[in-house]
Image (cartoon, helix red, strand yellow):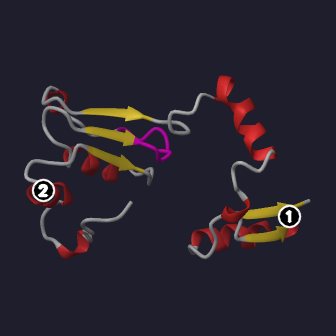
Amino acid sequence: MGVTEYINPKDFKKPVHEVIRELTKGGVDFSFDCVGNVEVLREAFLSTHDGWGTTVVLGIHSTPTMLPIHPMELFEGRRIVGSVFGDFKGKSQLPLLVEKCMNGELKLDGFITHELPFSEINKAFQLLSEGKSLRCLLRL
């Protein structure tokens, strides 16, 4: 998987969704909001193609923030869907996932970049927020 285009919103005087719609000649088929910010979600939604564009919400949004979407924008054929753990079904698929982890079929250790004692939990959060760590394992 690669990146075809990278867009820095600071490089443009117009909204990002307009840039994306011009670049893609009408909008993207799918957009993903992984941030948890309603302004980003709105831009992701508006960057999708009329008629079939889908925005997938992955980021956790604080409450009670509301998404500013006019109902007519939904009649253009775009849609917004939420996704918790992708398409993973916890009740039926979790036992298989645990089994694969225990058998070594899923290599999860590579995602742990730091191990710290629980007393250094603040340092773990600092590393994560600075982008210096992917996952911190805290030892009790």
Q: Which residue is mark 1?
A: 118
Kindly identify the amino acid type of the residue bearing the numbered disc 2.
Answer: Glu
Name the residue furthest top.
Answer: 92
Q: Which residues are magenta?
A: 57-66
Residue at 12% from the left image edge and 64% from the top image edge: 14
Report whether 125 appears left or right of 22. right
Number of numbered discs: 2
Question: Looking at the picture, does residue 65 appear above or below residue 106?
Answer: above
- 137 up-or-down from 57: above or below: below
- The residue positioned 15% from the left and 48% from the top of the image is 27
The residue sitting at 64% across, 71% down in the picture is 133
Query: Separation of disc 2 and disc 1 at Cα?
Result: 46 Å
In the depicted view, which residue is nearer to us: 13 or 84? 84
Q: What element does badge 1 sit on?
A: helix
Q: Is 75 left, or right, of 93 in this rendering?
A: left
Q: Quadrant of the N terminus?
A: bottom left
User: For this view, does 117 lie left or right of residue 135?
Assistant: right
The residue beneath circle 2 is: 18
Identify residue type, mark 1: Phe
Q: Is residue 27 left or right of residue 118?
A: left
Considering only vertical position in the picture, is 85 above or below 13? Answer: above
